[in-house]
Amino acid sequence: MQGQSLYINELQNPRYSITTLCNDVIFQVTTSYVVAGSNLETTEVNLTYDDLNQLLQTHLGLAGDNAEPAPSATQQLRNHKSALTGFLASVGKTTDARVGIEMTTRFDESLQTYLDLLDVADCTKRDRRSYLHRYRDLFAAHRNEALKPRRKTTTLSEALREAIAKKGVAPKTLAKAVGVSTSAIQRYLAGAVPNRRGIPGLHRLENALGLDRDSLTSLVKDSDEPAIADAPENQAFRSQQALRSADPYFLPVAAISEIFEREWRQFLTYKTTVTPGLERTAKGVWRCIPANTTPIDSPLAKVGNTVCPSAALALERIRGLLGYLARPLEMGGQGIPLESAQTLAWLAVPWATNGYMDFLTQRSDGLVHGGQQYFAGFVSSLVRPKTGYLRQRPEMRYRLPENVRPETPEGWERLCDDAYKAARLWIQHAKDLSRRPDAPIASLLAQESPLQPVMAAVGSIEQLAAHARPGSLSQARHKRDALLLAFVISNPLRLRTLQSLTWSADNSGSVYRTPGGWRVRLSRSMLKNGASKAGTRYDVAIAAWVGDMIDEYVEEHRGTLLGDSESTYFFVNNREGKPWAQMSVHAHGLTRRHVRGTHGFSLHAFRHLVATDLLKRNPNAVITAATLLNDSLETVMRSYAHLQRDDSFVAHHQHLETLRNKGTAK
């Protein structure tokens, strides 16, 4: 959220007030990121711990109509409150204080500090850990419910509300009088816009409310398209994402110990250096790229002045495993103390990695998909015979707890053998999809010209720019947004490449002007496949009509977006000179609002749209598609074989129809 604070209040219980967006998490205000802490507790849900205790009472069945709660529930409440009081004392708070970062981003750190202060039995510590985890989960669930976005108002809803208020009639009475369903009027008032079938009802509403003819229908965009319902698999995927977000488990970066960080640095050196010292496969090298070609800013992914994208991805997966190991038993984890959980050696322990992949499967409603496959492949690479990093480091077994640790190097070797076999089995079984990758653009792919709705969206955004105040920030943003969509269908580059594009008035940037028009030249470091033959040289033309948009953008609107600051990047969204980290998220919002027939899609989906559009028009242009995508011919043939298969059947069926017609004619 940029340039403003968002105020939302949709809670069922009005006593829980809401202030500004983002409770103790990183959020964006105008041009900078702020981390809310004990001295800056800008909260999304202004909930106190007394309020949280009330939520717990309801959760335990001690509130509402339950007049005679079970004695065990009452005792549970006492136990929870006792643990919470001690926990709050350790962070310098009382129950009348607002819930803060000690229950969100710094929960694990605060909890461990509290438990370290206790002089009680281990079983008591486990109980208190469990109680406090419940408080954390209750707050997370309550916060996610409170922050569900409100439906936006539309011009139609505003006009209808005003007319009904002036008439002084109840919507239900009005609906009955004009023969329109009550639910339809409620949807219109909430911001929904009817399709063509709803136009007659709007005319009757105009007459009943004493409005001029077409005063309401003129506010409805003319469209022959019916509303596109979200696919069931997309709905299920979004529901799963919401549940996962409410139940985080990854090891927080702030909780990473110095010992684990040293371990990680040694491993990162092994994966990136020219001379690793240990055996390594030819494909086992991680590529480093200049820091200015990626928005990744994690210190743990940096190697000197470069950044390693593979390291950032691998570390995220490792944090998932370690967070699972430290997760309480009653929440599906292993209940291992945080300090003991932090070592790469766990990746060689079969029951630990198997348990984590089972945990991922349960969170995916039983699907064994790409997430498990990637993790299993990573484990396999670490413990494979001869070249596996962990296989060659038997001394790392001493980082494991005594009850897990093999006593000898031979025992470590057997442990790696078992982990390797298990990982290969997981790779073989990972055949499911959490959702179809092309589901967000399925309605476009089914059209004869998949890019036509995107072209229409570019025109729609250009219209918004035309109606904005000349020279305003709003106009500049609309111009940039229209250019972004136009650019990516002209030159379907990957997200990181788009983020790293540069421009300079002296024509030294990657986007540059020639007498023949605008072009893009990319260094190998800006391309995903920069080390391959396809990435040796990239210097291509940009569509002429997009070039006209670039002229206007760099001469007028880019400077407006930057203000007094400077940036080397072509597409800008801040005044800090950094890559546009949220570019794909922003594109998803643009496509959701402006590309008809979809619920929005990411920038990567444009590559699929462009290739499909080309191959529908030119079925044999596989080499051309590979050139457009800057991908290998093998990859494109594998990805778009279904189109060629469809074309083959169409040709075959047309031939059969010809034969059938000839037979009928006789």
Image: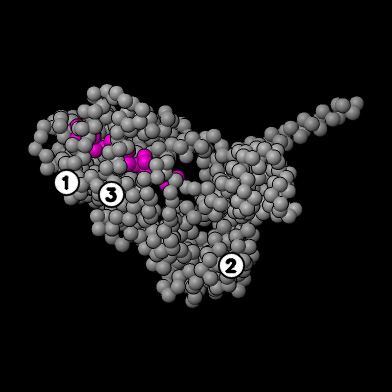
Q: Find out whether the residues at labels 2 and 1 contact each other: C-beta distance under 8 Å.
A: no
In the picture, measured across the screen, residue 410 lies left or right of residue 15, that is: left
Question: Relative to residue 351, is residue 28 depicted above or below?
Answer: below
Give the number of the disc on residue 289: none
- Who comes first in sequence, dot 2 or dot 3? 3
Residue under label 3, please give it: 98
Expressed as whole percent of the image width and height from the top left, the position of residue 139 reads: 32, 41
How far is the residue under mark 3 from the one under mark 1?
14 Å
Please give the name of the residue rendered at 63% of the width and 62% of the height, measured from the top-left corner.
463
How far is the residue under mark 2 from the one under mark 1?
54 Å
Q: Find out whether the residues at labels 3 and 1 contact each other: C-beta distance under 8 Å.
A: no
Residue under label 2, please give it: 468
Please give the name of the residue rendered at 51% of the width and 41% of the height, measured from the top-left corner.
437
Which structural element holds mark 3?
loop
Q: Nearer the viewer, residue 502 or 255?
A: 255
Question: Relative to residue 404, is residue 278 depicted above or below?
Answer: below
Residue under label 1, please give it: 89
How far is the residue under mark 2 from the one under mark 3?
41 Å
Please give the name of the residue rendered at 23% of the width and 45% of the height, measured from the top-left corner.
95
Q: Find out whether the residues at labels 2 and 3 contact each other: C-beta distance under 8 Å.
A: no
Which portion, as a residue range, is magenta?
A: 127-148
User: What amino acid is labelled 3 in the image?
Assistant: Arg
The secondary structure that dominates the magenta segment is helix
In the picture, measured across the screen, residue 117 lies left or right of residue 452, that is: left
Residue lying furthest front:
168
- Who comes first in sequence, dot 3 or dot 1? 1
- Who comes first in sequence, dot 2 or dot 1? 1
In the picture, measured across the screen, residue 35 lies left or right of residue 236, that is: left
User: What amino acid is labelled 2 in the image?
Assistant: Ala
**Which quadrant, please, contains the C terminus?**
top right
Residue lying furthest right:
666
